[in-house]
Image: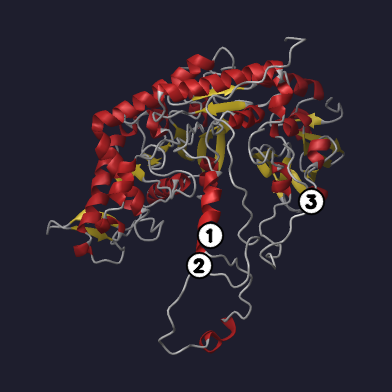
Amino acid sequence: MATTEKPFVGTPRKVTEHLTQNEKLSFEISSPGKKAYKLPPLDVPEVDPSELLGEAARENTGTLPELSEIEIIRHFTRLSTWNYAIDLGMYPLGSCTMKYNPRVNELVSRLEGIAEAHPYQPESLSQGSLQIVKLLQDCLIEITGMDTITLQPAAGAHGEFTGILLARAYHNSKGNPRKNIIIPDSAHGTNPATAAVCGYQVINLKSNAQGGIDVAALEQLVNEDTAALMLTNPSTIGVFENQIHKIADILHAKGALLYMDGANMNALCGKTRPGDFGVDVMHLNLHKTFSTPHGGGGPGSGPVACKKILEPFLPIPVVEEGSDGQLHWNYDRPESVGRVRAFYGNFGMFVRALAYTLANGPDGLRQTTEDAVLNANYLRKKLEDVYDLPYNTPSMHEVVFSDRRQVKNGIKTGDLAKRLIDYGFHPYTTSFPLIVPGALMIEPTESESREELDLFVDAMRQIAREAEENPELILNAPHSTRVSRLDETTAARKPVLRWKGHPASTPLTPDNSPAKEW
Amino acid sequence: MAYPANYRYTREHEWIEVDGKTGTVGITDYAQNSLGDIVFVDAPKVGATVKKGEVFGSVESVKAVSDLYAPVSGTVIEVNEELASSPEKINTDAHKAWIMKVELSDPAEADSLLSAADYDKFVAEETGH
């Protein structure tokens, strides 16, 4: 470390400071009597709500913000300029697959007949929508190599829940629901939660030195009480389970099922099919692999594909082609686990996922998988000399480093991530998977160009140098954001879930707080 | 931080201090350090039965929720109410901030647990330092 000069401070190349407007809560900028609407005069008899609703009629309507139209438009527009999104830059949040949402998806989902379709429309007027459902199902069945599918679940964990309900119904039909579900220690936390909610005991399986399934240990654990193994493939450290056939055989020999968490299907799509390597039931995340919106409320979509043996238990209704050549919803399925979602699932996401699938075609989907893997390995190669790589196994669509080299200067993965914000990137995933202490989990996805990846590499390398030469800078990061480190601990220990202040009484309250120092 | 020599330890990072038929259980300093700031402790109810090696509760930190594994079998006779409002006590003094007291159904079970020296060695191997 240089002793005479100032310590090293990196140069973010992707961002520079610029003005953004301050914004208070809508309650705080409210002033009585303002409206963003103008209603025509009442031309029907006025109704007294207390007469109609009795005791349920609310006398005090509470305090709601009152703003004019331009004020409310500016309020939300200003807030939106503080945001970070995939449309602004790389979003390398590992395991989350924050890929670009192609505009063609949006174009198609806004076509009038699709956007205005209503679930109560008669089937005869919904044939187009039903064909979208059917065609997407057929595509996903082909991609996964499974026999059948339900599109109902609304997210990944909801898909897991549905999948394990199918497994439970299957075992029940054989006379015994069984007791346990085995889950590797590298799994997403939703896996054990799913198993527990479905009434199973969770058995934890330790990963081997390569970060994969310890096949010998698995063989010891599996018996007639095992309902299923929940496996993520590739695993959360981005490694493909090359013993997957053997794993499936071990389970099937004891009558247990192989559940695959399809969170990382974007590393397999068009290359290999879970149905071919022994998976019995799996979910897909349309908001990951199939480019539908992720984050900001999605909404998500977590279809569950399965083998024929599980078909009788699928949620109702199931889309079927009748003898009249028309598509129908079939509700008459006595062994079904029932409904898991109102209506038919998040239909708007089916449209987007289908648009993505058809726009890419089989070769295009294969190309996205190859590009995702290439991008992750490019980052791995460019960063492995400055960040510790805990597992040497070849990476698929994401790469997991650890903060081991930086920890000796007191800098943890969370600190490095905070500094990355100053360089204009969304942080990677910190502290997950749990099998890697101090994990930096980086997933660039196929969306990023070489140029964007190089900017990211440059940022990460400068941060590594800062960690060596100027650790204080990183420990106090971010420096360029509107707020710096938030007190996450107090926020979690003493959460404030409701705004309790008073709205501004006059539109112009003089602000006597000291001016910002420049 | 040194691990008290009179405690016994699990590979899941719980400690237990056995006094006759009563065992006092908490998590180790290594565990609290890996978890980070603890924000919530989900302790069992008094009167609940716990079984050696099985989950009896969980601790939530800003990073993750982790299960707690019972070092011994028995009946919960007391839980540390203080942790409900001040879970940070575990961060400040993990080896004092106990989570539950158990009446042991089989005091011999504690003998199979790790000694302070063995636990120290286990942690060193686990972290590769």
Q: Is residue A340 above or below residue A47?
A: above
Check disc 3 and report its element: helix, strand or loop.
helix
The chain to which mark 2 is attached is A
Location of residue A432 (image quadrant)? top right
Mark 3 or mark 1: which is in front? 1
Q: How would you rate the neighbour count of disc 3 (Cα within 10 Å): few for under 14, some for 14-19, many for 20 or more?
A: few
For the point 60% across and 65% down, the residue is A65
Q: Residue B85 carries which label?
A: 3
Check disc 1 and report its element: helix, strand or loop.
helix
Q: How would you rate the neighbour count of disc 1 (Cα within 10 Å): few for under 14, some for 14-19, many for 20 or more?
A: some
How far across and how far down the image is residue A377, in percent? 45, 19
Location of residue A245 (image quadrant)? top left
Which residue is denoted by mark 2 in the rendering? A36
Residue type at mark 3: give it: Ser
For the point 35% across and 27% down, the residue is A369
The quarter of the rendered structure image containing the C terminus of chain A is top right
Dot placed on the residue nearer the N-terminal end, 1 or 2: 2
The chain to which mark 1 is attached is A
Mark 2–mark 3 Cα distance, whole angstroms, equals 44 Å
CB contact under 8 Å: marks 1 and 2: yes
For the point 42% across and 79% down, the residue is A40
